[in-house]
Image: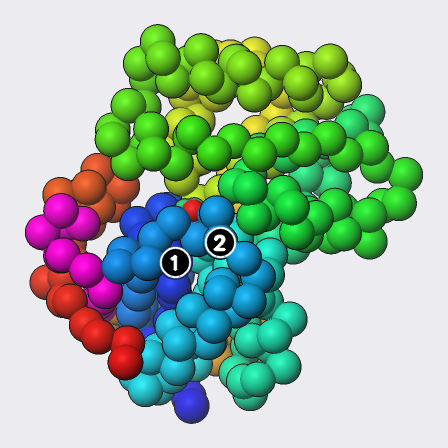
Amino acid sequence: VNENNPIGIFDSGLGGLTVLKEIHQLLPNEKLIYLGDTARVPYGTKSQDTICRYSVQNSLYLLKHQVKAIVIACNTASSYSLDWLSSLFQIPVIGVIIPGAKAAINQTKNKKIGIFGTKGTIHSKSYDQALKKLDEKVAISSVACPLLVPLVEEGWIESKITEDIINHYWKELAKEGVDTLILGCTHYPMLKTTISKVVGDKVWLVDSAIETAKAVKEVLKKNSLLNLSSREGAIEIKVTDDPDSFGKLSQKIISFQTNQIEKINLD
Ligand code: DGL
């Protein structure tokens, strides 16, 4: 691989486009190839074995396109399969958990950090481990928010019902007095406005998409893999199920042009 090769990004569906968007904004010259495993979404409710198998298949697909690095743009897949993928492949593999944890540690003043995530991410304790490694004195409270992904996918971003549901999940963390809340799922940055409204402006929200983009830049730089061309990099999007519905929703997340969305087969 060399610096002209694309960066491969995968997610269970469209949430990872929040990560793609930040990478493109920070590294506009990089070619990006995104795989949304829409045929098998959601990942947030599935077991570690299943998620590891899916993650390997997704990575092998990206490797066929000669990617120079793989970004796991999914909290659940990062939680369960980052170590496994890193041990299998020679190229850098970057997940979203460690960048999010670092940002939270840098931000908190009272060392009380809250986490919203899918069932899988919360169950895996990946954020707890990453946070404790950085600062063992930090107090962590987490809550699985299984209703938030479907709300985003239905486009219910700022409705009263969404606010009420966020409030229900938040109540548990508010009791703990957290001053920092990790948005531990790719879909949650899309709910940022509504989450802010519920938690108030004294709670810092950590959007792991932005932090992951910074981590990708750092890793590429360290490995002398940054694309130094002055031309804007092309973005290719692949999905494993119907590209039409994905196309409509994806336009809400990324406002820039991509090549056509192509349906592919992983087997
Ligand atoms: N991408 C997943 C995550 O960040 C959320 C959607 C899903 O459950 O597949 O955990």
User: In the rendering, at what x and y percent does residue 83 appear?
Assistant: 64, 71
* Tag 1: amino acid: Asp
**Considering depth in this image, is 20 or 195 the residue closer to the camera?**
195
Magenta stretch contains residue 220: no
Residue 187 seen from this side:
yes
Disc 2 is placed on an element classified as loop
Find residue 46 and name its label. 2
**Considering depth in this image, is 257 or 243 the residue closer to the camera?**
243
Q: Is residue 221 left or right of residue 139?
A: left
Mark 1 beta carbon near ligand 1 (under 8 Å): yes
Asked which quadrant contains residue 35, the reply is bottom left
Disc 1 is placed on an element classified as strand
**Residue at 57% across, 34% down:** 144
Q: Which residues are magenta?
A: 234-247
Find residue 108 and name its label. none
Query: Badges 1 and 2: C-beta atoms under 8 Å apart?
Result: no
Magenta stretch contains residue 244: yes
Residue at numbered disc 1: 11
User: In the rendering, at what x and y percent does residue 191 appear?
Assistant: 40, 27
Asked which quadrant contains residue 48, the reply is bottom right
Is residue 198 shown above or below 46?
above
Q: Quadrant of the C terminus?
A: bottom left
* Tag 2: amino acid: Lys
User: In the rendering, at what x and y percent does residue 101 appear?
Assistant: 67, 46
